[in-house]
Amino acid sequence: MEKPFEPPGQQLAGKAPKDDGGGGKGNVDSDATSGNPYAGLVSRLRAAWLSGKTRPVKYRVGQLEALGRFLDEKKQDILEATALDMGKPPFEAEFTEILLCKNELHETLNNLSHWMKDEHTDKSLVMQLDSAFIRKDPYGVVLIIVPWNYPIYLLLAPLIGAIAAGNCAVVKPSEISKNTERLVAEVLPSYLDKDCFAVVTAGVEETTKLLENKFDYIFYTGSPSVGRIIMTAAAKHLTPVTLELGGKNPCYVSDTCDVHNVARRVVWGRFYNAGQTCIAPDYILCSVEMREKLLPALCKVITDFYGPNPRESPDFGRIVEDKQFQRVQALLHSGRVVIGGQTDEKERYIAPTVLADVLPSDPVMQEEIFGPILPVMTVASMDEAIDFINSRERPLVVYAFSSDDKVVNQVLERTSSGGFCGNDTLMHVSLTSLPFGGIGNSGLGMYHGKFSFDTFTHHRGCLHRGMGREALNALRYPPYNQQKLGIVKAASEVKRKGMCTLL
Ligand code: NAD
């Protein structure tokens, strides 16, 4: 039996108390029966969901509009927090943390009542007077776990989908982007209905506890290794998951290209947010001839974009924390530094760096770089590039540059990845009309725009029949005979189109 619903008396945000038997410390309730510090929170949200409160379109619109007000009123705080966390340039913060969220929000608000409608479907002959439809049901209480690199966008974009679909939600920001985490925990709950939405601040230990609870859906964005931990925890409750993961995104540059345009588009995508972008082009594959043209073009563009000393550029970010800094810095020892390579540990600065003479076995080619380093590897042909891509884990995105559409299409057709972008980088993510997600090692499931609504929606197949016309039903009841079977088949068979039969 569910416990009667008690509205929470305080903002639902905070670290789980380490040893809190009675829920008196911190601001996450404890559940005496299970001993799990988050059990009380989850069961309160589930009670609110079961009350039906989140279902009306008016309620959903109200909460979504409140998210819009959060973005408008706290824009400056968001820019400051992301600047403190990773030196995110205001332009980049406004584009990715604010504008992309607003686009998701507006796309959702413009279409929500239409998306929510029952979808009536085809029916067999005997059901022509009945109603067959897909009901867009919310899952219930969902958990959204967020990484640090786009700490607002990667929190709000899935939350918009969860609210739109009529769910209650617990969001867990990354503890690594600590200034943004604090802002979200302190401010976001005051915009949302606290009965239904909670921010939980948690490190690994507390998140492990949080994951012991039964959620109705888990939406996780982060690394593939932690993705496995999340999926294992979800499996205990048979909870469905979306996993938005990372990996190494190849960027093939063919011999027929406008080299300077390629250099601008690749440099922008690689060094945006100091390279800490899951869809950044991770490495270039090109011929030796193209490499000779591309390397000077990349060097020129880096100087054009960030000046002779990128450390002084207001448009170039910093690595988020010391551990990440050490990890990325170690990757500078692969191959030969063509430009960049400078570091400053105190500032967590790593210059925009291009590496040549890189081998597939080098450390920089063994893990997702997630920092401002661009290795250039040579291949003998497009076929070799495609074989190289296909011999590795499936990436989140494949990039291909060529003035010849046939080459771009060949790379698209002969590789497999979460998404694809020809002749540009990152921009495919800005379209709310495209599904966004990985495949294989880069993830499971998709979102953005209508795909977010669908992700957080259970598509419930419903048939509602009339009580009469029992004579028709009698044909399917025992005692069976061949004549009944013939009629049942004729009335309910799905026929192949274009296959002409006498019946
Ligand atoms: P991460 O996997 O370390 O952390 C992500 C979240 O998981 C954080 O909230 C963290 O607190 C939590 N977490 C970490 N370890 C955990 C554990 N053992 N148990 C439970 N929860 C745990 O990832 P990150 O370093 O924050 O982000 C970088 C990774 O995320 C990269 O691989 C990047 O490609 C990927 N990413 C993917 C997308 C996408 O949309 N596909 C977007 C951004 C980042």
Image (cartoon, grey):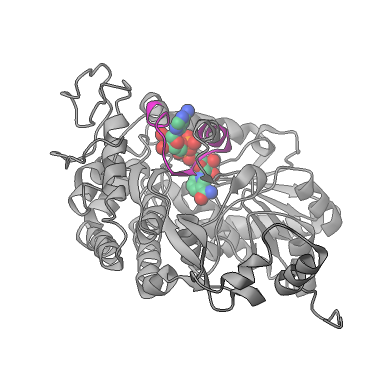
Please name whichever residue, 440 or 170, is drawn nearer the observer in this view of the structure: 170
Q: Which of these two is toward me, 316 or 306?
A: 316
Q: In x, y percent, where is residue 146?
A: 41, 43
Q: Position of residue 186 (x, y in %)?
A: 20, 43
Tell how many labels: 0
Residue 72 pos. (x, y %): 23, 63
Q: Which residue corresponds to the image point at 59% horizontal and 46% vertical from the top-left?
A: 443
Magenta segment boundaries in residue numbering: 209-230
State the image coordinates of residue 344 (x, y, percent, origin top left). Answer: 43, 34
Q: Does 357 sit left or right of 91 as displayed?
A: right
Quadrant in which residue 493 is drawn: bottom right
Q: From the viewer's perspective, tell me whether residue 51 is left or right of residue 392.
A: left
Decide if residue 278 is on the left or right side of residue 206: right
392 w.r.t. 138: above or below = above
Asked if one can make out residue 70 in the rendered structure from this viewpoint, the answer is: yes
Residue drawn at x 36%, y 46% is: 87
The residue positioned farthest toward the front in the image shown? 479
Q: Nearer the viewer, residue 394 or 215?
A: 215
In the image, is residue 212 part of the stretch drawn in magenta? yes
Q: Residue at x 42, y 28 (%)?
A: 212
Q: Quadrant of the C terminus?
A: bottom right
Above or below 26: residue 370: below
Q: Is residue 422 visible?
A: no
Q: Is 264 one of the magenta-colored residues?
A: no
Comparing 171 with 103, the one in front is: 171
In the rendered view of the protein, which quadrant contains the N terminus? top left
Which residue sits at x=69%, y=59%? 294
Residue 193 to residue 407: above or below: above
Say left or right for 13 vs 314: left
